[in-house]
């Protein structure tokens, strides 16, 4: 099996074989990535939705090239750095999906006028500060909170939406574009049925808001679990999923994807074996996997082991093993004595991460692309 390594500045380095791996390494299957992108684009086309995928999950020129090859030219980013990086990759229609940071007005002004930039606001105060300092035209979404309670105007606070829309009418540089929602509460659902209920409830609240403002307001939604599972896009104009390019263990457990759609693995070397307590230690901790966990059988799980890789090849596990505990550099896995006998020092464990966005970001400097069977 061959891997193409991609380093942080997105330049090609070399071809590696599995036997050359030395440390924790993030592996991405480009064939699955392409399948996931095509499937999501087909869904967007089926429902006549604008497709503006979030690129914070991958931050990769290789995945960006697949997006471009599939005719996808609109993207969402989560920082000004990311925005500028993807402009360099050729994208000219970019939404910065996080609330705008006033300290970066000068960077926004430096972006050429031919690049379409969408920003997110939820404050008249920030709007007015921007309007005084902007030297170019920018469109803005009102960041809308439909239940996540992270950022954005609460969906039932109609007067604040009206204020922002009103001040935009006399602005020289800021054009009102619509409402942008990220329903992160979907990630706390038990299953796809609860996701469907939360999604439908969110759309109902948004419809009520739009009826009190302007019915033709653009509505953009952006959570992978609901977008992957629902066929209800009533009133939605644009979707911005990001995690779908890779998916992960959390998405599988939610019912948002199948095992075959998960395009990522973390390969982690075994550095400790403790038969007296039936535990293995791998050199992959919070700085590789993140501290995000899900509950499986009443225990925290930071990733699941699906195979062992040794010099003899890949040995699939009939039962997945959980990464049970993490410190900064260490991962601890409970095993049986029989499983311990299968695993030797220096073998690599093939792990499905909990959250692909976090692991991908942590592993940017040591990411490889391949196509596994």
Image (spheres, rainbow, N blue to C red):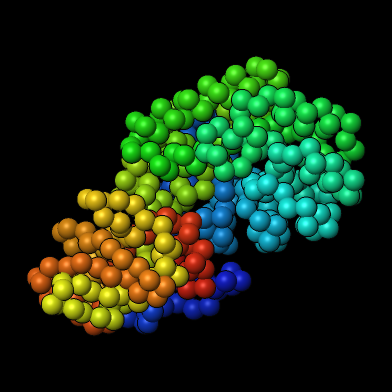
Nearer-the-camera pick, 370 or 340? 340
In the image, what residue occupies the spot 81% across and 49% down?
A: 114
Looking at the image, which is closer to me, 323 or 9? 323
Which residue is more in the foreground, 5 or 280?
280
Instruction: Please tell me which residue is depicted at 74% across the width and 39% down the height of the picture.
Output: 123
- Left or right of 294, for residue 128: right
The quarter of the displayed image where residue 22 is located: bottom left
Image coordinates for residue 347, horizontal then vertical, percent:
26, 78
Image quarter in which the C terminus is found: bottom left
Can the viewer see residue 61? yes
Vertical placement of residue 253 versus 230, above or below: below
The image shows residue 355, relative to residue 27, as above or below, that is above
The N terminus lies in quadrant: bottom left
Number of numbered callouts drawn: 0
- Residue 296 in the image, given as x and y percentages of width and height: 26, 51
Identify the residue at the far top of this view.
Answer: 211
Report the residue at 32% width, 60% height from top.
303
Whether residue 264 is visible to the viewer of this picture, yes or no, is no
Query: Residue 85: x and y, percent?
Result: 67, 61
Q: Is residue 142 above or below residue 96?
A: above
Give percent across and percent down for residue 340.
Answer: 15, 74
Q: Is residue 65 left or right of residue 280?
A: right
Name the residue located 88 percent from the left edge and 35 percent from the top edge: 171
Q: In the rendered image, which quarter is residue 268 located in? A: bottom left
As displayed, is residue 222 above or below residue 47?
A: below
């Amino acid at each position: 099996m061959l891997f193409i390594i991609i380093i942080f500045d997105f330049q090609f380095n070399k071809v590696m074989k599995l036997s050359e791996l030395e440390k924790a390494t993030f592996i991405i299957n480009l064939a699955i990535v392409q399948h996931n992108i095509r499937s999501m684009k087909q869904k967007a086309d089926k429902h006549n939705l604008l497709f503006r995928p979030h690129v914070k999950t991958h931050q990769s020129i290789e995945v960006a090239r697949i997006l471009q090859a599939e005719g996808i030219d609109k993207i969402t980013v989560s920082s000004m750095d990311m925005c500028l990086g993807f402009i360099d990759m050729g994208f000219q229609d970019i939404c910065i999906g996080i609330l705008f940071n006033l300290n970066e007005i000068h960077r926004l002004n430096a972006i050429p006028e031919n690049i379409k930039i969408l920003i997110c606001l939820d404050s008249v105060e920030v709007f007015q500060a921007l309007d005084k300092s902007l030297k170019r035209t920018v469109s803005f979404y009102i960041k809308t909170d439909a239940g996540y309670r992270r950022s954005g105007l609460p969906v039932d606070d109609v007067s604040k939406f009206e204020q922002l829309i009103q001040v935009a009418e006399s602005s020289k540089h800021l054009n009102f574009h619509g409402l942008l929602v990220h329903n992160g509460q979907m990630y706390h659902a038990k299953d796809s049925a609860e996701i469907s209920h939360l999604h439908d409830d969110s759309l109902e609240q948004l419809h009520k808001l739009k009826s009190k403002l302007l019915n033709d307001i653009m509505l953009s939604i952006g959570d992978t679990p609901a977008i992957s599972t629902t066929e209800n896009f009533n009133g939605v104009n644009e979707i911005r999923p990001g995690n779908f390019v890779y998916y992960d263990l959390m998405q599988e457990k939610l019912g948002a994807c199948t095992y075959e759609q998960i395009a990522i693995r973390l390969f982690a070397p075994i550095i400790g074996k403790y038969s007296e307590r039936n535990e293995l230690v791998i050199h992959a901790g919070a700085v590789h996997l993140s501290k995000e966990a899900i509950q499986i059988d009443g225990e925290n799980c930071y990733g699941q082991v699906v195979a062992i890789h040794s010099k003899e090849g890949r040995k699939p596990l009939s039962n997945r093993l959980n990464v049970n505990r993490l410190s900064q550099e260490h991962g601890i896995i409970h095993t049986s004595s029989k499983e311990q006998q299968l695993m030797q020092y220096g073998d690599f464990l093939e792990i499905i991460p909990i959250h692909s966005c976090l692991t991908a970001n942590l592993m940017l400097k040591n990411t490889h692309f391949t196509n596994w069977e």
